[in-house]
Image: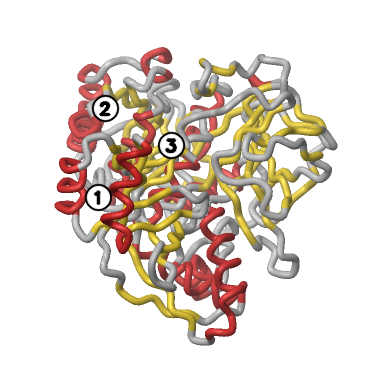
């Protein structure tokens, strides 16, 4: 049943505790039996969701994987978003495939730049957000200050659902407003091992604080939350297990089931009979032994059955989906059926691309998965010029996956790659070497940004004749203007009023 699906992501700034919370949710949901604590055994055991080599070296999530687990009759699909600031593009597209999000905030640092950026992406799609203030077992900022910051910076109503009894050295547990019970720390490590105090004695100053918070902020309203106007706030510590069960229960009880998705022609409801979905991510070489490419599809409507034929909008000819995959991190199983809200992996050899819509009749086009103008452009130089063919294949693969964008200049032989953030360049070089056995270096390109050009044919021809050294084609063959500076873009826009210079391009 679609109503028993919850598809959500966790957004945070690096180091706010997203990986730890992800792992504890999976542990509590019974999906894993050993929390590979991020710092355990001298960095040897990494969080299982971070599988790429560069992630293991840095302890960050770079690719977004999908983890599915079940609890109390509800299927949870957790999409792991890259938390690193450089990965805004892949993260953005992952957030198009979720129905709600958990925002993790470090109690000592409050809202950090990356959290803010990801929040704005959620707001574009009115994705409802549950807030988790993490690390209250350490010294942190005043809880009122944190709530006010969320309310002011994000222009959201906040409704505290729990309250910390002290922080850091004074931490004595978490009060749950709904029940009046307090979850208490135990043992030398002062973690939550299941001890619930049903008739708690709370020191006066903390009791007063908790009462004041309850009175000062609005009550939780599920409609305001689902409309993206209010966020319920839970306090806890993912590392010490405080608040983890509350997170799962909040997603189960409040988060919306699969939502309708926008298309060119109105919204597609999950209850529609025809099977439809869209590809929000393509991942190559998840299994280095098999050069596989897996397209991640968010199912929007209908009941998908294994072996079904679906037509991708980019192709026009149907493909049979024989071995769709359900994910748990690196473990996969073949899915016989899937419901709206589920994420399935479709193995393919480059036929499916990010932004493709799939449907039985090929009459649906989902919207809202753009490419962004790159902020960093580099030339790719091969160390061994005989490997030009391998390089072209690698760049095409990686641009299809959304790791980079590749531009082929109209004049000059060196290809140019564009990325939204610096870390993507490291990922590119590391993957070229590890997966494609291509050694390459990146050199500075004389360009600062790129714009997609559209408009009147005659104006376009004239523009091309004057600006050929600054023009390139992207991998779809669309014309791109490579600008030396933002001033350059403005100048050309003024000079060519019949053309549009787009900073995004719908995929």
Q: Which mark is residue 210?
A: 2
Say which label, 2 or 3, has the lower sequence index: 3
Q: Quadrant of the N terminus?
A: top right
Residue with the mark numbered 3:
102
Q: Which mark is residue 108?
A: 1
The foreground one among 29 and 62 is: 62
Q: Residue at x 60, y 50 (%)?
A: 282
Q: Residue at x 53, y 17 (%)?
A: 265
Residue 36: image quadrant is bottom right
Which is more foreground, mark 3 or mark 1? 3
**Crowding near pointer 1: few (<14 within 10 Å), some, many (20+)?**
some
Residue 131: image quadrant is top left
Q: Secondary structure at mark 1?
A: loop
Indicate left or right for 322 with 439 as reference. right
Is residue 41 visible in the rendered structure shown here? Answer: yes
Residue 42 vertical position relative to residue 385 in the rendered view, above or below = above
Report how far apart the C-alphas of labels 2 and 3 lie in the structure: 23 Å
Indicate left or right for 347 with 44 as reference. right
Q: Residue at x 38, y 23 (%)?
A: 177
Report how far apart the C-alphas of labels 3 and 1 lie in the structure: 18 Å
Residue 423 on image: x %, y %? 39, 65
């Amino acid at each position: 049943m679609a109503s028993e699906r919850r598809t959500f992501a966790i957004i945070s700034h690096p180091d706010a505790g997203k990986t730890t919370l992800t792992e504890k949710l999976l542990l509590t949901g019974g999906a894993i039996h050993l929390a590979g604590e991020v710092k355990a055994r001298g960095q040897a055991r990494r969080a299982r969701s971070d599988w790429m080599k560069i992630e293991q070296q840095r302890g960050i999530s770079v690719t977004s994987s999908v983890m599915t687990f079940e609890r109390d009759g509800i299927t949870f699909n957790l999409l792991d978003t890259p938390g690193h600031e450089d990965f805004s593009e892949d993260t953005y597209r992952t957030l198009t495939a979720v129905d709600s999000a958990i925002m993790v905030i470090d109690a000592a640092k409050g809202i950090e730049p990356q959290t803010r950026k990801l929040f704005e992406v959620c707001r574009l799609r009115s994705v409802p957000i549950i807030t988790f203030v993490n690390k209250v077992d350490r010294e942190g900022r005043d809880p009122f200050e944190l709530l006010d910051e969320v309310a002011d910076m994000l222009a959201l109503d906040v409704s505290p659902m729990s309250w910390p009894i002290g922080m850091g050295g004074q931490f004595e547990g978490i009060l749950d407003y709904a029940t009046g019970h307090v979850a208490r720390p135990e043992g030398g490590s002062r973690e939550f091992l299941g001890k619930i105090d049903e008739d708690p004695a709370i020191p006066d100053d903390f009791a007063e604080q908790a009462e004041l918070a309850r009175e000062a902020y609005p009550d939780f309203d599920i409609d305001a939350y689902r409309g993206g106007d209010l966020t319920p706030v839970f306090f806890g510590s993912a590392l010490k297990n405080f608040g983890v069960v509350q997170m799962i229960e909040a997603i189960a009880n409040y988060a919306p089931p699969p939502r309708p998705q926008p298309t060119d022609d109105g919204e597609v409801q999950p209850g529609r009979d025809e099977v439809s979905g869209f590809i929000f991510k393509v991942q190559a070489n998840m299994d280095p032994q098999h050069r596989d490419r897996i397209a991640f599809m968010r199912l929007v409507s209908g009941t998908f059955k294994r072996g079904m034929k679906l037509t991708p909008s980019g192709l026009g000819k149907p493909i049979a989906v024989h071995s769709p995959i359900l994910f748990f991190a690196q473990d996969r199983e073949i899915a016989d059926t899937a419901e709206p809200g589920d994420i399935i992996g479709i193995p393919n050899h480059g036929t499916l691309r990010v932004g493709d819509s799939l449907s039985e009749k090929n009459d649906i086009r989902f919207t809202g998965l753009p490419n962004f103008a790159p902020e960093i452009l580099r030339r790719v130089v091969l160390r061994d010029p005989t490997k030009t063919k391998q390089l072209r294949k690698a760049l095409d693969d990686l641009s299809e996956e959304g790791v980079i964008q590749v531009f082929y200049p109209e004049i000059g032989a060196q290809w140019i790659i564009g990325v939204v953030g610096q870390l993507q360049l490291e990922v590119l070089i590391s993957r070229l070497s590890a997966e494609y056995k291509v050694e390459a270096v990146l050199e500075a390109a004389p360009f600062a940004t790129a714009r997609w050009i559209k408009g009147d044919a005659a104006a376009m021809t004239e523009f091309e004749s004057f600006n050929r050294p600054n023009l390139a084609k992207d991998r779809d063959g669309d014309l791109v203007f490579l600008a030396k500076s933002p001033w350059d873009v403005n100048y050309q826009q003024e000079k060519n009023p019949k053309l549009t210079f787009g900073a995004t391009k719908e995929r």
